[in-house]
Amino acid sequence: MKRFIVTGGYGFIGSNLIHLLIKKNCKVLNIDSLSYAAQKYNLKDVKNYTFVKADINNKKKILQILKKFKPIGIFNLAADTHVDRSIDNSFNFIKNNILGVYNLLEAIKDYKKKVRLVHISTDEVYGDISNPKRSSERDAYFPSSPYAASKASSDHLVSSYVRTHNLDALISNCSNNYGPRQFPEKLIPRMIYNIINNKPLPIYAKGKNSREWIYVNDHCEALIKLFYKGKVGEKYNIGSGINCSNIFIVKKILQIFKQKKIKIGKKVKIQFVKDRPGHDFRYALSSYKIRKNMNWKPKTSLSQGLSKTIDWYVNNKKFFLGISKKLFIKRLGKR
């Protein structure tokens, strides 16, 4: 049975990846520090995996785990990811996204046994992209937010350890994910939560900012393909190739709620709010490399993915009950 470590396994993408790896009969160890966005509810139905509470900044602990568990692969999803939080206070983003990756790389280096690292990054490292351009793996990084800068830094660290220390590692840069188990500080789960709870739907500026959206399971399938077929030291963009404005996404969610005949309260109305500082207008990826070299493509359309996502949150309202409202209701990133 193949052994994998997933860091940040109680988070959104990490928990969905663990569900998929278990379905593929893999043995999984979840390393999570249980920060505010980690939700044990995300793996409540998964029995045959191991959890160790640890911070990837703790190099000694990570090295002990590697020696004991002996994985063939590590998927690094341990990260702080909310742009608005990084605007309010960047410290945890520097600590976890840069120093954490440094300590993880050092532990892997000192492990001295073959293990492949798939480091999961973001399309935001490329910065604002004008239409109709799409970022390729050869493009320079121009991060705008402290969050994006911290992820760009971690990508460069991984690349340097491949070159200098011959680590078996590669990098994925993915577009906006959505789906079950996402913390409700992000756009789609926040809108779903507000609709369910008869609250207004706040959208930055006029909602025209463009994002490329991918259903989380499609992303996780791509990550597993990268582990088996990706080349050492390479970067791979992962995206759907379809961009939508934020206002389009919110209207689409409302439309699906109506199609499902789910009651929508009178207070559920789109409400435009002041934009956040340095807000990039458009992210867009070229995923040609992974599509051509690994015969991968997303399987889930936006309508299908949003429908599945809404169903999950409607049927798992206890997910919201386990989260303090203070962590996602209050507006962040006003500076």
Image: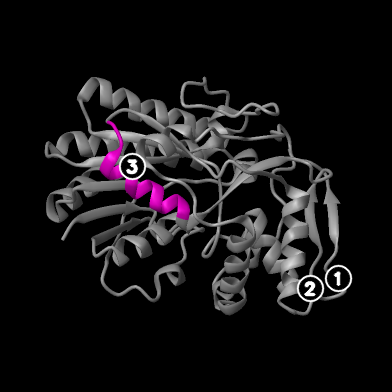
Q: Do the residues labelled 2 and 3 touch (CB within 8 Å)?
A: no
Numbered circles on residues, count: 3
Mark 3 lies on residue: 226
Question: What's the residue at 58%, 79% (across, down)?
Answer: 315
* Spatial CA span between label 1 and label 2: 5 Å
The residue where tag 1 is placed is 267
**Mark nearer the N terminus (1 vs 2):** 2
Magenta portion: prevailing SS class: helix
Task: Confirm whether residue 56 shows in the render.
Answer: no
Is disc 3 surrounded by few (<14), some (14 to 19) or many (20+) residues within 10 Å?
A: many
Q: Alpha carbon of mark 3 to alpha carbon of mark 1: how far? A: 44 Å
**Residue 221 magenta-drawn?**
yes
Task: Please report the residue visible at 50 percent of the width from the left and 46 percent of the height from the top.
Answer: 80
Q: Which element carries disc 1, helix, strand or loop?
A: loop
Label 1 close to label 2 by CB (< 8 Å): yes
Q: Position of residue 299 (x, y in %)?
A: 49, 55
The answer to whether residue 56 is above or below residue 322 is: above
Q: How crowded is mark 1: few (under 14 residues within 10 Å), some or many (20 or more)?
A: few
Is 274 a magenta residue? no
From the viewer's perspective, is residue 320 above or below residue 251? below
Mark 2 or mark 3, earlier in chain: 2
**Of label 3 and label 1, which has the lower sequence position?**
3
Residue 152 point in image, percent of width and height: 48, 29
What scheme was used to colour the molecule?
one colour
Asked if residue 44 lies left or right of residue 311, the reply is left
Q: What element carries label 3?
A: helix
Who is closer to the viewer here, 327 or 161?
161
In this figure, which residue is indicated by the disc labeled 2?
198
Q: Residue at x 63, y 69 (%)?
A: 310
Circle 1: residue type = Lys
Write down the region rendered in magenta.
218-231
Split into 4 quadrants, where in the image is the N terminus?
bottom left
